[in-house]
Amino acid sequence: MTKNFFPIISILCFIIFLWYIFSVVLNSSWALDKAERSSKTLTFKELVADTWSQKKPKLPAPHQVFSEIWDTTFNKKITSKRSLVYHGWITFSATVAGFVFGTALGVILAIAIVHDRATDLSVMPWIITSQTIPILALAPMIIVVLGSIGFTGLMPKAVISMYLSFFPVVVGMVKGLRSPEILEIDLMRTWSASRSQIFFKLRIPKSLPYFFTSLKLGMAASLVGAIVGELPSGAIAGLGARMLAGSYYGQTIQIWSALFSAAILAATLISAISLIQRIVLKRMAWSG
Amino acid sequence: MTFFVLAIIFWLIAWYLNVKLSAYRASRLPKILAPVLFGMSILFIWEGAIESFNISPVILPSPSSVFIKFTISVPILWEDLVQTAFKGALTGFIIGCSSAFLVALVVDRFKFLERGLLPISNFMAALPIVGTAPILVTWFGFDWHSKAAVVTTMVFFPMLANTIQGLQMSDRIHKDLMRTYNASNLQVLLKLRLSAAMPFVFNGLKICSTLALIGAIVAEFFGSPIKGMGFRISTEVGRFALDMVWAEITMAAIIGSLFYGGIALIEKVITFWHPSQRGRA
């Protein structure tokens, strides 16, 4: 990590630098237009200052986005509809609910697939096919249909998140539960271990590194699912709804701040899993 | 009720057949037949449940009605497909993947860039980039150009991360061998490292192929001309014409699977040497 620290920081600085340049380029036409209408000529300095401080810029400058995030996170009451914490919490709860269901479904399917060849042959191809369907396209329909039979709020979004997050868990766990070598299984047999003993004492511990890797992928997928689930009309709260409202009213700064809080949320959730992974694997004496 | 019971019986028989089939390891037949039987039993149970429990078509249409709707609205479906999949998704996929590939080749020359960009692009690949859709739609307008732009940004980082990682995959001993042949950097890249990177490149392409269609469809929710799969889905949901929505989904599933399958097929031809491709025949 320390080895990569300097390269990462310098590339991030470069990206921010490019971002400022682009916001000047993209916003300048509006600034020039405005100046022409009030028959003024702008010096270069005034032009730059204007492009970095417009109210509805095409591309808001980084400091505008971050001050918006700061403002809507810390200066608004948590219950307020303008608070990012409020919207973030709603997205967060849908993400986690879907993630938990998806993980449970994925683990159960993986166990069935590993132990029963008929399930492996008949269900596994359909699991893979299920992900080549652009399932996010189903999002508005799932929301409307579940809404019409009485499920509203958190559940429909969680269903979409679940659909997206179970897949990496199934694939990772099947790989993980099959990772014990024949030698190790034979050793268990010489100890006269039953099938369930092999499962709990060999297969489960051996699958844990795979499990955590799939959890991270599943969490990322689950967040995308929750955000897209909030896009269709009807959702009024959550980071996705905030993006949609922002795009309706041309509030670009609002869209960008919602986007960045989604990124921060993703980073937090994934690093939380990494932390748990490190603690658990250390306790189980897995090297690494 | 009878139809539902019959469907359940069919499912049980199919499951029994699958158990028998799976014990039969010598031929390839079970690998094809088992999933087909399973898929058919799901369709029968679905149809049977709709028929027997009087589920309103507004909630879930039956597979047969979806099939009928699909066959009579082929022209509309085709128009949507051209707009979304070919113009939007495919253009974006090609631009995004090829530019990511070229950037990876450049980055590969500089260790410093590589160290910084690999973690960043891994991180970006996990982000909900689809959220940039409303921004890009306002930048590039409602037609397919904005959809291609969304797809480009969505596929760029997964592809970049995979290609950079793939280019690191060639063994040291192979590189040393190339040195002893007095191979130039370009020759090492072309003859050794690019082919060693191919499994990762194809992994990236496969991930991107599903992302591309998702990106194009979701971008249409934010504004589109009066055609396109995402447009059709959102308007037909509003009219509660769920059979049309499901016909559109079927179309998306077919094109998505074809796209993915095509890439897998090319992969099989190009990376025939890789352990995951050998020994399966």
Image (spheres, coloured by chain):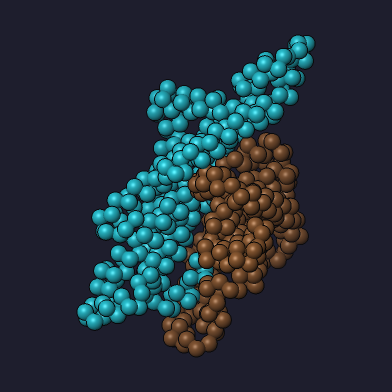
B266 or A35, which is in the foreground? Answer: B266
Seen at 27% across and 68% down, the residue is A200
The location of residue A70, given as percent across then percent down, is: 46, 26
Q: How many marks?
A: 0
Q: Is residue B179 above or below residue A88?
A: below
Where does the C terminus of chain A fall, quadrant-wise?
A: bottom left
In this picture, is A51 found above or below B219? above
The residue under the point 21% across, 79% down is A191
Which is nearer the eye, B56 or B96?
Answer: B96
Residue B67 percent coordinates (x, y): 64, 67
Q: Colour of chain A?
A: cyan
Q: Position of residue A235 (x, y in %)?
A: 51, 40
Q: Is residue B39 left or right of residue B231?
A: left
Q: Quadrant of residue B187?
A: bottom right
Please state if A179 lies on the left or on the right of B127 as rendered. Answer: left
| Rendered residue at 54%/84% (across/down) | B28
Residue drawn at point x = 45 percent, y = 74 percent: A120
In the rendering, what colour is chain B? brown
The answer to whether residue B152 is left or right of residue A272 is right
Task: Say whether residue A230 is visible.
Answer: no
Answer whether residue A189 is visible to the viewer in this image.
Answer: yes
